[in-house]
Image (cartoon, helix red, strand yellow):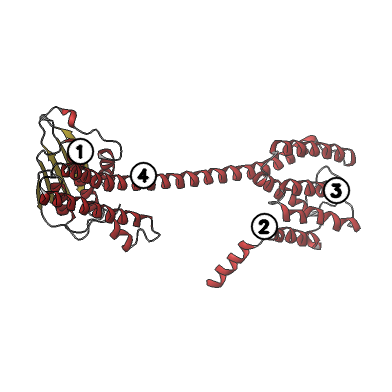
Amino acid sequence: MIALRRLQDGWRRLDVTARDLPLGLLLLGVALLPVWQRHGTRLGGVPERPFDAWTAAVIVLECLPLAVRRRWPACCLALVSLGFAADQLRGYHLVAGTALLVALVSTGLHLRRRRHATALLFSAAYVLLAVALSRLGSGEPPSEFVTFYLVLTLAWGAGAWLRAARIAESERGRRLAEDTRTAERTRIARELHDVVTHHVTAMVVQAEAARYLTASPDRLDQSLTAVSDTGRRAITDLRHLLDLLNPDHGTEAGQDARTPPVGRLLTLVEQTRRAGQPVEFTEQGTPSESTGSADLVAYRVVQEALTNALKYAHGSRTSVQVRHGTKEITVAVSTAGSGPRAAFPGGSGRGLVGLRERVDVLGGDFSAQPQPDGGFVVRARIPSGSPS
C-alpha cells in the first residue's frame, strides 16, 4: 500500500507532458499492429491505399501530439487534424484516427483562450477536407460528412462540459473556503469583543471611581488593585483567545483554551462587584462532565450582560441566576433600572446579537428584553453536550 502511494505521488510529480505521452504511445503501438490495420475511420469513400513509407509518418503525426494535449491543446488539435486529413486523403484509414476525438475532448477541456476562434477554424478546415474527399472519393452523400461532424462536435462538447464542471467545482471550493475564513474571523471578533469589552469597561469604571478616593488612601489602594487585577485577567483571557489561532486548535489543548475553568462565573461576578455594581449570584446544580460548548456560551452570556449593566446601569442592582440541568444550562441576568427604557442596550452585532447566534447554533433560546423600570433582563437556555 505504501509502495503504491509512493508510486502515485511520483507520477503526480512528473511533468504533465510526460504523463500525457503514454496514451499517444499506446495508440501508436496499436496502429502499427497488423491486426488493427484497415480498422480505422473511413470518411468520404477514398479507395484504400497499401501502407507505404508515409504511413508511419502519418501515424506519428496523429498520435504523438497527444503528449501536449493539456499543455498546448490548440497545437495538439492542429497537428492531429493534419495527420487525420492526410490519413483520409491517402486512404490509409488508420485506427490512429481515434486520436482526433481525444484531441477534441482535450481542447474543449483545457483550451483557455480563443476557444470560439479555434472552433471556427477547425470547422472551416473540416469543410475543406469534406470537399477534397468528395472529389477524390466515390461520391459519398453529404449526410455522412454531417454525421461525422456531429460526432466531432459531441467530443468538443464533452470536453467543454467537463471544463464547466471543473470551474463550478473550483468556484464552490473557493466560496466554501471564503465562508470558512469569514466565519472564523467573525468568531474570533466576537471572542475579542466579549473579552476586551468586559474587562476594559470594568477597568474604566474602577478608574473613574478611584478619582474620588484621593482622600481615602486605603480605598484608593483597593480600587487601583482591582484595576490591576482586572488588567491581568484581561491579559490571561486574551492569551487563551490567541490559542484559538494555534494549529493545535481543536485538540484537547485547543479546547482547554476555549472552555472557562470551573469557578470563573463567581470570579466574573466578584470582578463586577469590585467595579461598583451590586450583583446577586445564584448557581444551582453541578456542571456535567461533558457540556461541549454550553459552558463557554453560558459564561459569555453572563459576561456580556454584566458588561452592559456596568455600561448602561452602573450602580443598579443586578441578579445573576445560573442553573445546570442534565441536558441544558439556563441563565437569567436582570438589572434594575430607575429611568426610561432608553437605557436598554441595542447591541452592535457582536454583543447581544452575537450571543443570540451562538445560542441558536446550539439549538437553544435567547432573549434580551427591556423592563418597565428602565432595566433589562437577559435569558438563555443552552442545550449541553453539543461539541459545536
Report the amino acid beneath label 3: Ala
> Which residue in the rendered view is the most extreme toward the front?
215
Residue 144, position in %: x, y?
Answer: 77, 39
In the rendered image, which residue does mark 3 sit on? Answer: 86
Residue 194, position in %: x, y?
Answer: 27, 46
Give the label, 1 or 2, closer to the camera. Answer: 1
Foreground: 321 or 194?
A: 194
Tell me which corner region of the image, top left, top right, bottom left or bottom right, holds residue 341.
top left
SS assignment at label 4: helix
Determine contact: label 4, label 3, CB under 8 Å.
Answer: no
SS assignment at label 2: helix
Give the label, 4 or 3, closer to the camera. Answer: 4
Q: CA distance from mark 3 to mark 1?
A: 86 Å
Q: CA distance from mark 4 to mark 3?
A: 63 Å
Determine contact: label 3, label 1, CB under 8 Å.
Answer: no
In the displayed structure, 370 sits above or below 23; it is above
| Residue that appears at 79% across and 49% down | 79
Report the amino acid beneath label 2: Val
Q: CA distance from mark 4 to mark 1?
A: 23 Å
In the rendered image, which residue does mark 2 sit on? Answer: 16
Name which of mark 3 and mark 1 comes first in the sequence.
3
Determine contact: label 1, label 2, CB under 8 Å.
Answer: no
Name which of mark 4 and mark 3 comes first in the sequence.
3
Q: CA distance from mark 4 to mark 2?
A: 41 Å
Residue 66, position in %: x, y?
Answer: 73, 54
Name which of mark 2 and mark 3 comes first in the sequence.
2
Q: Which mark is residue 311?
A: 1
Name which of mark 1 and mark 2 comes first in the sequence.
2
In the rendered image, which residue does mark 4 sit on? Answer: 186
Foreground: 95 or 338?
A: 338
Foreground: 71 or 160?
A: 71
